[in-house]
Image (tube, rainbow, N blue to C red):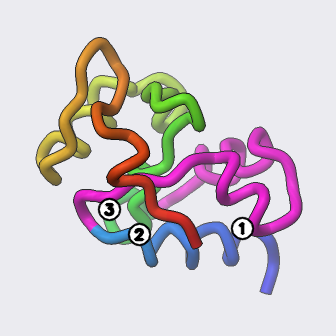
Amino acid sequence: MNLSSKVYELCQLIPAGKISSYKILANKLKTHPRVIAQILKHNLKPIKIPCHRIISSNGYISGYFGKHVKQKIKLLKKEGIKIKDNKVLNFKKILYKF
């Protein structure tokens, strides 16, 4: 299984209402967070493979399909995640670790 497939597989394990970070995925797969971001940028099945649940390790919402942060926030809020000023509230409480 290639790295992209592993990243997508892990994303599918994150339940609705939870988030994880690029750094957590990178540590799990022994790579760099930017590699994870580049892989997720090319996700062709964004709802089936919920890459919107991957955020920065400081709790801030970063890119989704390059620049569609508003769409990412909308999807996260739909799942019950509270966000203020582009930052996830209760970040550590809803953080999913593999």
Q: Which mark is residue 4?
A: 1
Secondary structure of residue under mark 3? loop
- Read off the residue under disc 2: 14
Type of the residue with mark 2: Ile
2 and 1 marks in contact (CB < 8 Å): no
Mark 3 or 2: in front is 2
Q: Residue furthest bottom?
A: 1
Q: Where is residue 16 in the image (x, y as percent from the top left)?
A: 25, 64
Q: Residue 96: x, y in percent?
A: 46, 62
Residue 43 at x, y = what percent? 54, 57
Q: Which of marks 2 and 1 is nearer the N terminus?
A: 1
Residue 7 as seen in the image, left or right of residue 26: left
Mark 3–mark 2 Cα distance, whole angstroms, equals 12 Å
Q: In this view, does 42 lie above or below 10?
A: above
The kind of residue tagged 3 is Ile
Return the residue at label 3. 47
The quadrant holding residue 13 is: bottom left
Q: What stretch is highlighted in magenta?
A: 16-44
Q: How far apart are marks 2 and 1 (CA)?
A: 16 Å
Q: How far apart are marks 3 and 1 (CA)?
A: 16 Å
Q: Does the magenta stretch include residue 39?
A: yes
Disc 1 marks which amino acid? Ser
Q: Residues within 10 Å of mark 1 (few under 14, many from 20)?
A: some
- In reply to whether residue 38 is colored magenta, the answer given is yes
Observer-nearest of 51 and 32: 32
- Which quadrant of the rendered structure holds the C terminus? bottom right
Query: Upstream in the sequence, badge 3 or badge 2?
Result: 2
- Tag 3–tag 1 contact (CB < 8 Å): no
Label 1 residue SS: helix
Residue at x 49%, y 59% (from the top left corner): 44
